[in-house]
Each structure stands twice: as C-alpha cells, then as structure tokens.
Image: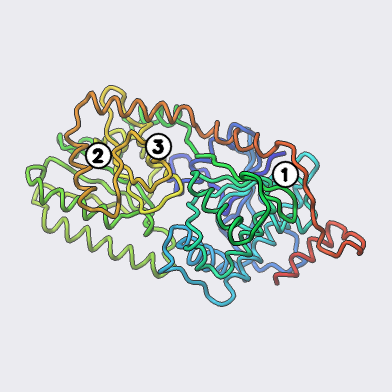
Amino acid sequence: MDIVVSNRVARVTPGGPMVGGLAAALLPAVEKSGVVWLGSSGNTRHIEPGDNPLVEVAGYGCGTIARVDLPEQHYGGYYEGYANSCLWPLLHARADIAHARAGDYASYCAVNAYMARTLAGFAAPESTFWIHDYHFLPLGRELRRLGVGEKIGFFLHTPWPERRVMAHLAQHRELTEAMLAYDLIGFQTDRDRDNFAAILRSVLHVPCEGHSFEGPYGTCRLATFPIGIDTDGFADSALKAAGDSDVHRLRASLSGAKLIVGVDRIDYSKGLGERLQAFDHLLDRYPKLKGRLSYLQVGVPSRSNIASYRALQQQLAAQVGDLNGRHGDIDWTPVRYLNKGFCQATLAGFYRAAAIGLVTPLKDGMNLVATEYVAAQNPADPGVLVLSKYAGAAQELDAALLVDPQDVEGMTRGIAQGLAMSFEERRARWQLMMDALLRNSIHAWFAGFMQALKTPAHRNVVPLQPTKAPPLRPAAARDAAWAAHP
C-alpha cells in the first residue's frame, strides 16, 4: 500500500474552489493511482499522549482520502508559528521576516511525532510512505524512531535556499540531519537539490557518493523531480469552459479588450506588488493601451492570522485602488482584483481568454499556474506566458518570456513584448512549452518518484532505546515518541 502524506488534503466539492497548488497537483494522481492520501482535517482537538488518532476515510476514484484532527495545544505553534512564520519565509529567502516564538519548534516537533504515530498504524511490509513539504521535514525521523523500516520518501514543493540563508534557522542542522531518515528526497530543481546537498557536505560533513548520503538510518538519495499537471485533462477543461457562466461574463465584459491574467494566493513570495507596479508603468508608457487592456488578478487571501499576510493584503488593496483611481475612466477599470477562489474549470476558462499570463513570483518551487496557463491555451491563437526566471517552472518552460520580478522596468518591457508578439512566434513558443508539459505530466512525476523510491536499498533502522535494551513493542514505542514531545 502506498501512503501519501501532506499537511492538508483536498476536500472535493464539485464546482468548488481549489486552493493550493499541491492539492490541485495530487488529486489527479490519487484518483488514478489508488493510493491513500492522508493529512490534517483542518480541525483540532485536545489530544493526550495516550489517545488513539481518529482517522476519517473516504474513497476518491481508485484512491482513498484520509483525514486526522491535529492536537489543538500544538497546532498554532506548528502551523502559523514554526511552519509559516519561520520555515516558509526562510525557504523563500526572506530571512528578514522569519521569526519563531518560544515553544513553536517544540510544537512543530510534537505534531510531527503525532502524525508519525498516526502513520505507524498503516505500516506493513508492503507499505511505502511519501511525505510532502516543509510542514513535515522531520517526519521520516519520527517514523524511524517508532521502528518503521519501510520505504519513506520526501518531496519539497518549495525552494531550498543557499546555506547562508538557512543558517538563519537555529535548528537548520538538526532538521537537515533528521531528513537523512528518508530513503529519497525529491526537489523541484537541481539548484534546490544542490543547495540542500551543500549543507550535508559542508556543514554536517555527511559521507557521500554523488547525491547519495550515508546517514544514521542508511542511504539517503537526493534527486530532482519537477512536478507537472494533468496536461490533457486541463486542456480539455479549458476547451469546455466556454459554457461556464463566469467565463462567459468575463469574455463579454472585455468588449474586444485584451486580457492579462494572474492567479495567486496573497503571499509575499508571489511578487504581486511588483507586478502591479509593472502594469502601472505599462499604462504610463503606452497610454494608447488604456481602455484596450484589462488586468484580472485573482488574489486568494491566505494565512490571515499572520501579521505579515494581513499587512500585504492591505498594501495590495491600496495599490490597486490608487492605480485604478489614476488610470481608470467612467467606462474602464484597469485592474479587476478579486479576493476569492474559483474552481479549476473556471480558472481554465480565464486562462484561455487571456492574451498574457502573468506569473512573476520572487521565489517559487515550481508554480503550477504557469503550467496551467500554457495547457489552457487555444492552439489556434495561443497567448503569451510572462514568467519569473526564479520560478521552478522556468527550467522547462524556457520558451516563455522570462523576466526578473525585481526589475519592474524589465517586466514592463516583457508584458509589452508579449502584447506585440506575432502569431507565428506565439504559436512556436507555445508548442515548445506544451511539448514539455506533455512529457512531464503529473502522472509521469508521480510514477517516476515512486519507482525511484522503491529501488532496493539497505535501511539501518535505529531503535529508540540503546541496543542492549530489549526492543520496544510497537504500541510502547509510539507512546514513548509522543511523550518525548508533550
């Protein structure tokens, strides 16, 4: 049995919004592969060390979705604290706003230990575990401490920055060493893989051969697995989206104007402020575009309990208001700024209607909006992708117009170049990108990682107790691990 683990699992509501690239990516793979996808339910409850995890299970296609409540006494420190106020900014090279409160790291470790206790119930000789993302960096170690000897893989959806950035994290040595408990660690790009390897080699001095490292639990391999999407499925959704009411209203409201589209969570890593500045400069430089161009920015609020996110939401709202006030007219609003999510089918229709897809994160692991925009295009009249060179997607979508999101003038020129591009060039660039997406679909990514993970390798599982002591029974081992992080 293959078990996939992430912080949250998608709640599938027909026609409902899809929030988060990971959920959008994993659902098609779960539906067709028959795996169990387990994660937090989004709910919490008070959990004592001896309490048994309660897992809610539901079928999804050939697969299964399982949800578990997390301990409320640790959830705030784990999620809003250590994961999203400390790890997330550092992984996106924002050491200036990364901070952790006293006790956040202990809560982060406690939730990882609890999730390990939950997962250990699924362990069997044929089980394989695939852990996802920065919420669970030490989860593999916690599973090994419970005596789990099955294959455990890990995939990081975010970037992994240079070691000088990670050195700002007080626990960077401990967490990096803990990750050696995984058989295989996957990254979006070679750059992320090499940044991680640099810490193992130069800081921890872990014995290695190539990208294989010898840790306390055996061999840990590092590899690159750029994530994809269900390209054919998304293209089909975009084709059918003409009948969607929101898409129809959008197209009708344009009255012949060209559309620029951006779709993002409101996050400081997405470069939304700089993107608005570039559009502002575009209207200043090319006033003839006024009334002939419309920019739709879907900005889904995220992590609003964190001060830096609330401040960004306020900043962007003020920026849009100022831009529209200066450039707008009675019958034309330059920026349509929507703070709500849309279902994937509707977004596919938005992408297909847009002459420019604007995807300009300051840092990003992959960014599936870029790949979705390309897949959604009409082959007979494709739009142009303007893409940050710092997004992982830029590695395979190098036929996009690549820009530096910190260079506002450069982004302005990129948008203008895309608007003026000939059909022949648009078609040629789109075909190159589409070919890359078809080669590297979500199904190829999923199968490729699982195949690599299941490659035979010796594991030396270290017990919790000294080797001279009698081995703990599974239940006792699990209770001991939980008690270590009360």
The answer to whether 108 is drawn above or below residue 340 in the figure is below
Point 70% across, 72% down: residue: 486
Look at mark 2 in the image and give the residue it sits on.
Answer: 250
The earlier-in-sequence mark between 3 and 1 is 1
* Amino acid type, callout 3: Thr
Frontmost of labels 3 and 2 is 3
The earlier-in-sequence mark between 3 and 2 is 2
* Amino acid type, callout 1: Lys
- Rendered location of residue 438, percent (x, y): 45, 27
- Residue 118: in sight, yes or no? yes
Q: How many neighbours does mark 3 have within 10 angstroms: few (below 14), some (14-19), or many (20 or more)?
A: many
The answer to whether 177 is drawn above or below residue 366 in the figure is below
Point 30% across, 55% down: residue: 272
Q: Secondary structure at mark 2?
A: helix
Of residues 54 and 397, which is closer to you in this image? 397
Frontmost of labels 2 and 1 is 1
The disc at residue 151 is 1
Point 50% across, 66% down: residue: 86
Look at mark 3 in the image and give the residue it sits on.
Answer: 371
Point 91% across, 64% down: residue: 469
Q: How many neighbours does mark 2 have within 10 angstroms: few (below 14), some (14-19), or many (20 or more)?
A: some
In contact (CB < 8 Å): disc 3 and disc 2: no
- Rendered location of residue 284, percent (x, y): 10, 51
91 to the left or right of 254:
right
The disc at residue 64 is none
Q: Secondary structure at mark 3?
A: helix
Of residues 10 and 220, which is closer to you in this image? 220
30 to the left or right of 165:
right
* Amino acid type, callout 2: Leu
